[in-house]
Image (cartoon, rainbow, N blue to C red):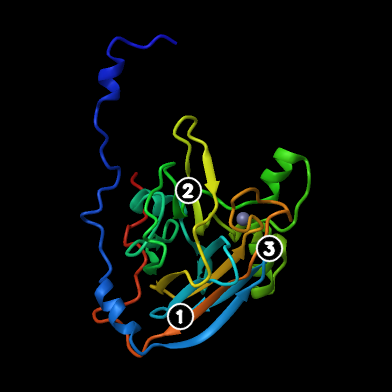
Amino acid sequence: MTEPQDAEARRKIPPVICYPVDTLPRPNLAAYQAVREGWQKVDEVIVPPREARCFSVPAGSFFRIVSIEGPQVGDLNLWAAEDLNERFFSGKTRALHGTHLSTGDQLWSCLPYLRPMATITHDTLDWYGFDEFGGSVHDVIGTRCDPYTHKLLSGHEYHHCCHSNLTRALADRVGRSRESVEPAVHDVLNVFMCTGFTRDTGQYFMKASPVRPGDYLEFFAEIDLLGALSACPGGDCSSEHSSDVAVCHPLLVEIYKPKTRPEGWAPAPRSSYSRKHGD
Ligand SMILES: [Zn+2]
């Protein structure tokens, strides 16, 4: 196609932010930080390599995803504890906070609920920023590795993709069949994963995660949560996923209960939109 004469002028139009966040209610991070003092670790869950495990976090408590033993990427799903229909909405979270999350960003639930499910309160990888390739950590741009895409691209079956791991973990947790809970598994927060889009072709890329044992991502639960974390078969995602090739390590989930609620905090209400949708 030939370019129009004003092609350059059109390209030069400056972008506008789709969702300016000046009106977005912001969490009081200082109040959250204050109640970490003297908190108590009340539970922990080890997620074995190429598997997933569920965990519960009451509203007002914290949870950490911790790197242990070696670099490893984790795929996180969140549901409202009492209702699997309310789940993490990675697409809207991306639209509000950007492609990669860090301290102060919130994980929003799907429509028609649209409320913060969790707030990131600490990120030991926040030093990474964006690298020369446009890569950064903790993305909401990927989905999760899954056996359907793998079959499509390779013709082979592999049963320990994050999608399958999350499906098995959720089925075990709620005592239902894998088939019945599979639709509740959703696009993830890619914890510790280093990703971006190539500048020339716009393709989704991954590269070796900078995470090291001792690093963690910490969240405050805004509502009662059921979480599931998969230790991705891609390991540190430096080469490939959807196979048993990569070196994988376990991940640790820790639950912390503070002595008090953060000052002025209450569990987030569901969206107050009337749901009339017009005439
Ligand atoms: Zn994965």
Q: For the residues carrying marks 2 and 1, which lies nearer the camera in this image?
A: 2
Work out whether residue 190 can be spotted. Answer: no
Residue 238 in percent (x, y) is at: 59, 50
Mark seen at residue 58: 1
Which amino acid is tagged 2?
Ile
Q: In the figure, 57 relative to 17: above or below?
A: below
Q: Quadrant of residue 154?
A: top right
| Position of the C terminus by quadrant | top left
Could you tell me which residue is drawn at 37 percent across and 48 percent down?
95
Circle 3 is placed at which residue position? 50
Mark seen at residue 141: 2
Could you tell me which residue is drawn at 44 percent across and 47 percent down?
135
The answer to whether the residue labelled 2 contacts the one labelled 1, judged by CB atoms less than 8 Å apart, is no
Could you tell me which residue is drawn at 64 percent across and 57 percent down?
163
The 10 Å Cα crowd at callout 1, few under 14, some 14 to 19, many 20 or more, is some
First in sequence: mark 2 vs mark 1: 1
Mark 3–mark 2 Cα distance, whole angstroms, equals 21 Å
Residue most extreme to the right? 156
Which amino acid is tagged 3?
Arg
